[in-house]
Amino acid sequence: MQAQRLLIMTVAGSLAAAAPAAAQTIYPINRAEILEGSHFDFKVEFPDAPASADVKVTINGKSADEVFGKPTTFLQNEEGQKHSALWLRGASLPAGSYTVEATQGADRKATVKWEVFATAQPRRAKNVILFIGDGMSVANRTAARILSKGLVEGRYNGELAMDDMSDMALISTSGTDSVVTDSANAAHAYTTGHKSCVNALGVYCAKNALTLDHPKVETIAELVKRKTGMAVGVVTNSEIEDATPASMVAHTRRRSDFNDIVRMFYDVKPDVIMGGGSPNFLAKTTPGSKRTDGEDFIAKFKEAGYTLATTKAEMNAAVAGGSKKLLGLYNTGNIDGAFDLRLAKKGTTSKFPDQPDVVEQTKAAIAMLKGNPEGFLLMVESARIDKYSHSLDWERSVFDTIMLDNAVKVAKDFAGDRNDTLIIVVPDHAHPISIIGTYDDDRPGQLLRDKLGVYAESAVPNYGPVDADGYPTDVDTSRRLAVVYGSYPDTCDTGRPAMNGERVPAVKGPDGKTNIANEKDCTGPLAARKTGNLPFDANSGVHSADDVILTAMGPGAEKFRGHKPNTYVFRVMAESLALGGK
């Protein structure tokens, strides 16, 4: 035994001695696909803070300075940290294949390969409309189709607008650091064509101490503004500074940098900006402001020629008045979703009684943007599909899926037979949500699971008649879809819609750290208490790594087929708009 232990220790010691030292990190990362002529920050990080004489960086066998045509900067002990860095801000490259090698001393070498892709001329699409259903999973689409179109003898009575599109693909969403993504780096992949890490927008995640200093990559909105005369629009029902809308303009390692993101919106100046989140536009001296400085971005946007709208009526008046630049801020937080705007009248509807929904915002945005002779790029997000799934509030999530689909119909009606508008509908990530049957109050038993019908017992739900926009007018009926989430904290489920306001599945327990079931959801004869399957500090559902479904139509849509990484969405948009080149 002693001999065996000595042998194991000797082998382990030899392996440790042979293990390579920490390697250099190169940004952009390996297998990056970079648009020809787009701007990006080139950075190489060297561990242990070597001097410049001890490192070497080549691109296709030549010095980085020669390839980029600009001098790089070397920083030993960058920011006082235990690494050195070679930088070039605002780099760009012509089309081709590139191999980047970074060596440090005699035994440390890192290699990455890049593809810099060109885009063919002439430009194929005059307009691009990107719809992002945040967190919209397959079950969202299925439930939306059941609720809005109806199901008879196994066939639907109609198709969703997003279903009736010529091309489809499966999109994977994982980031550089994790299997399961968040909305920031997921949307960033669509708007930059680069992978990144959780919470990052428009940057790679390096060792920089400050959130705004990480290596940047140009967004599609910046590209369009820099290289074309196209108009740009950003529409959401979240706070405008939130991850998905911010991905059009932002460069920060921390998605919660709302004040900086407002400044980035101002720097890029999309022609149409609509969402919630007004407090971060107000100078700190203004009551209700969340800014930490004295800058008044409402005033700044007005000085830049924008019309301000804070209600649906003001938005429509701006359109009727011929405004070409609009800043629409309709709520201090997120705009209420369709379930509350149309049915339950909860949330903040009493405080903000004239909020536009995503459909109305889309109509207004297209009306403003379509007059630009060079075309337009419009991103529209239905954000609360995701937020309501975090709350395990599937009815609200599905109502907002129907709302997104109605907005897609608006875009399809605009595109008509023009054949100059690429329309893409895609989630940024999924949630673990499934339809497993129906709850029927007429089934015998005293427990929620007694009321669950599966297989042959899962009779079609009897929701109230749909209105002209495809929303059921009654969802608290005797037979309802049984929709379940695969991730949840300690919580309770009643199997009924939350008519008194968005669900709060869990609250802080007595220790102030762990979360426990919200007892308000645990009342009623059928309430089922569920032991959570998430970490104890979780208070809501989480995302899943499932692939998501993309559908598309228009020039360039035929490139979507099979399985693609999320960065491919950017590539198709860039190619359709011919954004490559200097």
Image (spheres, rainbow, N blue to C red):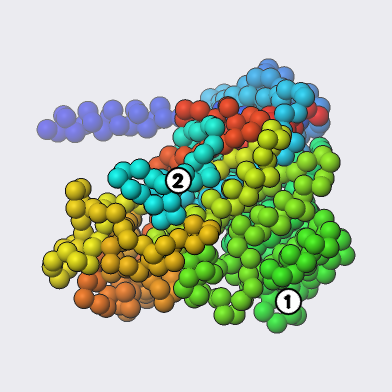
Residue 293 spot, x, y in % from top left:
75, 71
Inspect this view and state whether residue 301 appears: no
> Which quadrant of the structure image shows residue 14?
top left
Residue drawn 53% across and 59% down? 468
Q: Amino acid at mark 1?
A: Lys
**On screen, 31 above or below 209?**
above
* Residue nearer the viewer, 58 or 12: 58
* Residue nearer the viewer, 570 or 91: 570
State left or right for residue 525 relative to residue 130.
Answer: left
- The image's mark for residue 158 is 2
Which marked residue is nearer to the observer: mark 1 or mark 2?
2
- Badge 2 element: loop
Residue with the mark numbered 1: 284
Q: Earlier in the sequence, mark 1 or mark 2?
A: 2
**On screen, 53 above or below 454?**
above
> Which quadrant of the structure image shows residue 219?
top right
Report how far apart the C-alphas of labels 1 and 2 lie in the structure: 51 Å
Q: Tags 1 and 2 in contact by the CB under 8 Å rule?
A: no
State left or right for residue 75 relative to residue 105.
Answer: right
* Residue nearer the viewer, 93 or 428: 428
* Mark 2: few/some/many CA within 10 Å (<14, 14-19, 20+): some
Q: Amino acid at mark 2?
A: Gly
Residue 343 spot, x, y in % from top left:
48, 70
Residue 331 spot, x, y in % from top left:
63, 71
Inspect this view and state whether residue 442 appears: yes
* Mark 1: few/some/many CA within 10 Å (<14, 14-19, 20+): some
Residue drawn 67% across and 24% down? 117
